[in-house]
Amino acid sequence: MILHVASIAALFVDQVALSQCFVKCVQDAPTPEWKWWISALAPWIGPLLSGVVSIYIAWRVFHWQGEKDRKQWILDKKMAEWQELLKAAVHIRRIVSFGSENSEIRAQRIREGLKLAIQELEVSAEKCVFLSDFLGDEVKSERFYSFLRDVDLDAEKIDASFERSQRLQSPNPYLTDKDRDRAIEAYLLERGELAVKIGREFIGFNDWLHKEAAISLETLAPERRSAHKEDEVTP
C-alpha cells in the first residue's frame, strides 16, 4: 500500500516537472526575425522618415520660391523694356498730336523731329530681349514695323513738299505769280493732309501698343484681351 502511494506521488511529481518544462519551452520560443528587425530599427525609422519628409518639403518650397523669383525677374525685365518702347512712343505723340496750332506748324514739327523719334522707337525695339511674345509674333511685329515704315515715308513726303515750296520762291520766268501761289497752296494742303494722316495713324498705333503691353505684362482683363485679339484679325 505504501509502495503504491509512493509510486503515485512520484508519477505526479514527474508530470509537474514535465508541465513546467513545456511551459518554459513555450515561453522561450524564438522571436521571428522580421519582428526583431522592426524592433531594432524602430528607433531609427521614425526620425529618418521625418528627416526625409522635411528635406522634401524644403526642396519643394525652395523650388517654388526659385520659380516665383525667376518669373518675377523676367516680368521686371519685360516691364523695363516696355517702358522704353512706350517712352519712345510718347516722344512721337508730342510731335504728331493735334493741338491748337495750324496744320502747317504741325507739319513743320513733324519734319524736324519725327524721323529721329521713329529711329528712337526702332532702336528701343531692337534692344528688347524679353518681349518675344510681342516682337517675336509675326503678325504683331509686322504691324509694329509697318507703322514705322509708313510714318517715316509720310515724313519724307512732308519734307519733300517743303523743299518744293521753297524752290517756288526762286525767280522763274516761266511761272506766273498766280501759278506760284496756286502751287504753294497745293503743297500747303498736301502737308496738312499728311500731318493729319500721321496723327490719326499714330492714335490707333499708340492705343494698340498700350494694349499689347498690358497683355504682355498680364494686366489686361481676359474679356478685354479676347476683344483685343478679335480687333487684330479684323481687316
Image: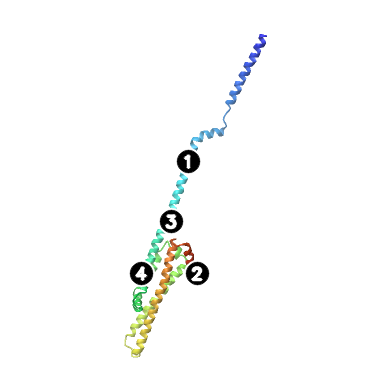
Q: How is the image coloured?
A: rainbow
Along the polypeptide, which appears first: circle 3 or circle 2? Answer: 3
Who's the residue at 45% across and 68% down the image? 141
Q: Name the residue at the top extreme.
A: 2
In which quarter of the view is residue 99 placed? bottom left
Q: Which residue is mark 2?
A: 233
Asked if the residue at tag 1 contacts the one at tag 3, i.e. Cβ–Cβ closer than 8 Å, the answer is no
Disc ID at residue 50: 1
Asked if the residue at tag 2 contacts the one at tag 1, i.e. Cβ–Cβ closer than 8 Å, the answer is no
Quadrant of the drawing holding the N terminus: top right
Q: Position of residue 213 (x, y in %)?
A: 42, 64
Q: Residues within 10 Å of mark 1 (few under 14, many from 20)?
A: few
Q: Amino acid at mark 2?
A: Val
Q: Residues within 10 Å of mark 4 (few under 14, many from 20)?
A: some
Q: Position of residue 112 (x, y in %)?
A: 34, 75
Q: Which residue is mark 3?
A: 71
User: How far separated are the C-alphas under marks 3 and 2?
Assistant: 30 Å
Would you place residue 230 above or below residue 172 in this image? Answer: above
Would you place residue 216 above or below residue 154 in this image? Answer: above
Q: Residues within 10 Å of mark 3 (few under 14, many from 20)?
A: few
Q: Amino acid at mark 3?
A: Lys
**Camera-side residue: 90 or 42?**
90
Disc ID at residue 37: none
User: How far separated are the C-alphas under marks 2 and 4?
Assistant: 28 Å
Who's the residue at 52% across and 33% down the image? 39
Along the polypeptide, which appears first: circle 1 or circle 2? Answer: 1
Q: As drawn, is 85 to the left or to the right of 50?
A: left
